[in-house]
Image (spheres, rainbow, N blue to C red):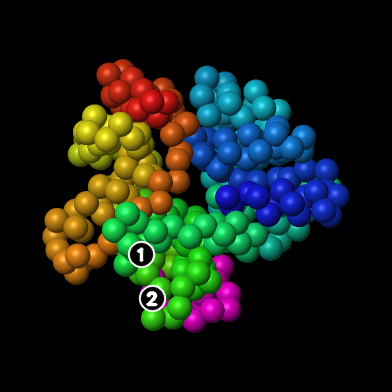
Amino acid sequence: MKLQYHIKMIQQQQYQGFVTFGGAFSNHLAASAAAAEQFGIAATAYVRADSLDQQNPTLQYCMARGMKLIATDRPTYRQRQQPDYLQLLAKRHPDCLIIPEGGSSSAGVRGVASLDLSATPAGPANVVACATASGGTLAGLITAGAQHHKPETIPLTLGLAVVNDSSLSERVSSLLAGSAEKSANWRIVATAPDVRYARCPAEHVDFCCQFALKHNIALEPVYTGRALYKLYQMIAAGDFTAGSRLSFFHTGGLQGLAGLYYRQLINQQQYQLLSAAAVG
């Protein structure tokens, strides 16, 4: 959803392609490569890595779909939001739209905002939750709440942060506009403050496996599993009023399972179980 209006901009403004950013196992890069192939658009990605690992399953997927990958060291990668660096890239790629990391831009927010995820079998949700890292999905859900509901019925939008980034709240605020900007009915909750991003504690992996066995729904422990694990903890702790209706946005990212297995962060049995649920 975060890419649909970026693609429309490329088509309508006659860009030749796009440039974007991501880590070596990025869900955003995989989704961007797939979209570029589908619409016949040239795609370039600056990858946070000193060199490109040709055995990395995510990078293999991206390259197989025609995406050009450029290894970018961490000091340079940290400049990806700086105006001077973006101007340099605009000169280097003059016919390309620059899409921020994670697709988190006003166009990305607009795409997510077209979704109304507040419906549950028991009635309108009081809380809509999602994993958040770059902030675009969360900003889109906040905007959706403002657009699809009267002020008195806007659900709480809960961003379950899978990154330990003190600037995340400010970034989300910068992506909001109009009625959504005025809505105070959202907040960010850290999922595991003592765990670095993309690490997989045993309790997160176990939760994903048990969830797959019980519901035949696949999660991965970096984004959706880590976030849903925290949401379950909050429910158990009584953080929500009794009778509250919760809606959790499963944002996918299941391509990352292969990368976790490749890095030996999950074992073969766990990988097979989660992969089976992903296709089952």
Pointer 2 residue: 153
Residue 133 tag number: none
* Residue type, label 2: Thr
User: Could you tell me residue 222's position as x and y percent?
Assistant: 36, 41
Helix, strand or loop at mark 2: helix
Q: Is residue 235 magenta?
A: no
Badge 1 or badge 2: first in the primary sequence:
1
Image quadrant for the C terminus? top left
User: Could you tell me residue 255's position as x and y percent?
Assistant: 47, 31
Image height of 18 relative to 276, above or below: below
* Residue type, label 1: Pro
User: Could you tell me residue 244's position as x and y percent?
Assistant: 24, 65
Q: Identify the residue at image location x=39%, y=59%.
A: 119
Q: Are marks 1 and 2 in contact (CB under 8 Å)?
A: yes
| 153 on left or right of 37 | left
* Residue range (magenta): 174-187
Q: CA distance from mark 1 to mark 2?
A: 9 Å
Image height of 137 relative to 149, above or below: above
Q: Nearer the viewer, residue 74 or 7?
A: 7
Q: Identify the residue at image location x=53%, y=29%.
A: 58
Image height of 258 relative to 168, above or below: above
Q: Identify the residue at image location x=41%, y=22%.
A: 262
- Crowding at dot 2, Cα within 10 Å, few <14 / some 14-19 / many 20+, comes out as few
Q: Nearer the viewer, residue 112 or 78?
A: 112
Instruction: Please say whether residue 79 is visible from this viewpoint.
Output: no
Q: Nearer the viewer, residue 73 or 37?
A: 37
Question: Where on the picture, by quarter, is residue 126?
Answer: bottom left
Helix, strand or loop at mark 1: strand
| 123 on left or right of 56 | left
Question: Where on the picture, by quarter, is residue 256?
Answer: top left
Q: Identify the residue at image location x=40%, y=29%.
A: 278
Pointer 1 residue: 124
